[in-house]
Amino acid sequence: GNSVTQMEGPVTLSEEAFLTINCTYTATGYPSLFWYVQYPGEGLQLLLKATKADDKGSNKGFEATYRKETTSFHLEKGSVQVSDSAVYFCALSKAGNTGKLIFGQGTTLQVKP
Amino acid sequence: DTAVSQTPKYLVTQMGNDKSIKCEQNLGHDTMYWYKQDSKKFLKIMFSYNNKELIINETVPNRFSPKSPDKAHLNLHINSLELGDSAVYFCASSQYEAGSNEKLFFGSGTQLSVL
């Protein structure tokens, strides 16, 4: 079946450090891939997405590249801020577009000043 | 204006009770969802409605019954609550566009605690 696996958290970084959160997926066909972010006490928000192989999604300094050969969609940011502290979810959506997202287990990021 | 609003934000109740969570979206979207997030932050879809019609029904106990009176509202009623129902329930909405994968807009969640 379709699934998403993320690296275990929490990830604790100092401000201005480089961030990588790994995400790999299992799916038939060509899914679209997403990163959602959940700030404390809030619902999830779409951070970025990529809909085909080699696409790069980017937003707010975050980037992720759709790598079909390694079935990965790792999230990166060059310099994190305290305000980036949140839970990050990788997700996929199958073609056919029922709107059903399959989420990874979430990775908590803590950024310390 | 809150795009997707759900009430209540917190719900504490006894085992065996029946409770409802309400959700409303003012985005004009035609699809709404209920997701469940467990204590380990794992998020899983429960139901999806498109224009008041049920289109996704994951393997959820039939104690859970969604109701969509119109496309802007999707309520979740839970009968005979069990300890394992304790979780955060998120409502979400999206607008279907052919050939693309829509962006979901989430509410801020309802934290249900069953004692």
Image (cartoon, coloured by chain):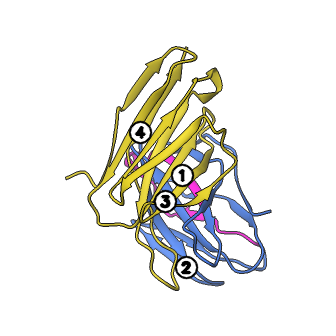
Q: CA distance from mark 4 to mark 3?
A: 27 Å
What residue type is disc 4 on? Answer: Pro
Front residue (pair A8, B34): B34
Q: Is residue A85 magenta?
A: yes
Disc 3: which residue: B49
Query: Which one is earlier in the sequence, the residue at label 4 or at label 1?
Result: 4
Q: Nearer the viewer, residue A34 or B36?
A: B36
Q: Which residue is mark 4?
A: A40
Query: Could you tell me which secondary element the residue under label 1 belongs to?
Result: strand
Left of A46 or right of it: where is A22? right
Answer yes or no: do the residues labelled 4 and 1 have beta carbons within 8 Å?
no
Q: Which residue is mark 2?
A: A56
> Are the residues flagged by discs 3 and 1 in contact, CB closer than 8 Å?
no
Q: Secondary structure at mark 4?
A: loop
Residue at numbered disc 1? A88
Relative to B18, is B97 above or below? below
Q: Which range of residues does the magenta coloring cover?
A: A71-90
Going from the N terminus, do you reach mark 1 or mark 2 first?
A: 2
On the image, the x and y values in percent for residue A12 come to: 56, 41
Hey, what amino acid is under mark 1?
A: Tyr
Colour chain A appears in:
blue
- The reply to the same-chain question for discs 4 and 3 is no
Q: What chain does mark 3 sit on? A: B
Write down the chain letter for disc 1: A
Residue A24, horizontal then vertical, whole percent = 73, 63
Which residue is at a point 45% across and 80% down the rendered structure image? B97
Nearest-to-viewer mark from 4 and 2: 4
Q: Are marks 3 and 1 on the same chain?
A: no
Q: Label 3 amino acid?
A: Tyr
Does residue A12 appear in this view? no
